[in-house]
Image (cartoon, rainbow, N blue to C red):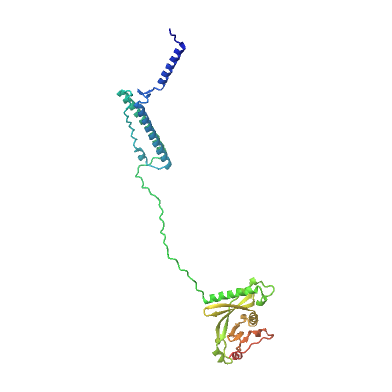
Amino acid sequence: MCSINPKVVAGLADNNQTKISMALKFQFQFAGVNFSRPSSPYRKWLRITLMTLAAVVSVLAYWEYLEHLTHRRRPAVAQSAVAAPKPATVTPAKSTDSDASPASPSLKKAAGESLLAMGNYLMQSAKTASDTAVATTVPAQPMSAPAPATTPYIVAAPIIQSAPTPHQYRVHTDQERLLMAGQTAFDNVMDSANKYPDAYGFQDGDFLSSAKLGDPIPVYTIQENDRANYQRGQELKPLLKPAKQWMFPVMMGDRICCMVEVRQHGREYVPGSGNKSLALAWNKIMEKWPVEDGYHPMLVVNPDVPGFYFTVPELPQQNITDTIEMFYFHPGLSPADVILASWR
């Protein structure tokens, strides 16, 4: 006779009770529809519906984010005219599982209506929240035709390329070129005077930087025919012609230190060297016959005779005197007819 162990029987009973509890735990129903079985077609409907609702809610949330980002102002009428989204229709898929248990028509209808009602409620809630946010952000405006959008634009001026302007050269006058040549001669003399100041009439205590260039003194000559035909007592000044030669005094205050020469050759003005002896003689000439007393001494040269001569036209006796005469103890004037006769 076989005996049954009570512990084994109790273990089998507990095992069966656990299986039953686990089976009941994963079995649930919604509106009379059983969703516990994996092959149930209603589980597919529920999954499709939830995915559709999630997509709609995501689109609405993204649209609301764009509205807040752009802050576009729209008329209130346009907002109220937004149509409610069409409820999503869920088409149940036919089950091809041979093991699926058939459901009653009333049960299918009730499940479909419940799912549609849930989807409509969720979409209506999302639409209401979106409209409330837009209405709070954009104030209501009176109904009017929307103004055409205007886009600001910049009109760029056309770039006109003009022809290059030819370089214009300024033509200097004869007087300007004469002064430029005198300045060049002055600079050359001052460079040499830095080494040998006494040779150019500068004294101890003179600051060479204080030396300045004076106004040019024109030099005159007498043509050969006029020299040959000159008569004693004849007025000399009408016979004086420009020699195309100038002497620039180098001034240290009121004292002339030396003279710098400029000659004209054709249209060119050529700077020359300095002359200390002429400056010393001219200082004495201007001291003896000053301009303040109405005298105007004039420098005269003979191209064939070296040295400089001078004449004072305001004196009653017509005269031409060598500048060396001014270095004598008692300088005197020479008659013009005597000097011109020696030039023949």
In the rendered structure, the answer to whether residue 234 lies left or right of residue 148 reads right
Picture coordinates of residue 259 (x, y %)? 62, 78
Residue ID at (43%, 15%): 12
Left or right, 144 with reference to 192? left
- Closer to us: 38 or 125: 38
Which corner quadrant of the image does residue 255 belong to? bottom right
Quarter of the figure that contains the C terminus: bottom right
**Residue closest to the far top:** 1
Q: Quadrant of residue 228?
A: bottom right
Q: Is residue 86 left or right of residue 216?
A: left
Q: Pinpoint residue 285: horizontal percent, then vertical percent.
A: 64, 82
Q: Position of residue 111 (x, y in %)?
A: 34, 26
Quadrant location of residue 256? bottom right
Can see residue 44? Answer: yes
Above or below, comparing residue 34 to residue 212 in the picture:
above
Q: Is residue 93 above or below residue 139?
A: above
Q: Locate residue 146, reporting x and y percent.
A: 35, 45
Q: Foreground: 232 or 176?
A: 176
Q: Residue at x 61, y 85 (%)?
A: 306
Q: Is residue 321 above or below residue 202?
A: below
Q: Which quadrant of the rendered structure holds the N terminus?
A: top left
In the image, farthest residue toward the front: 1
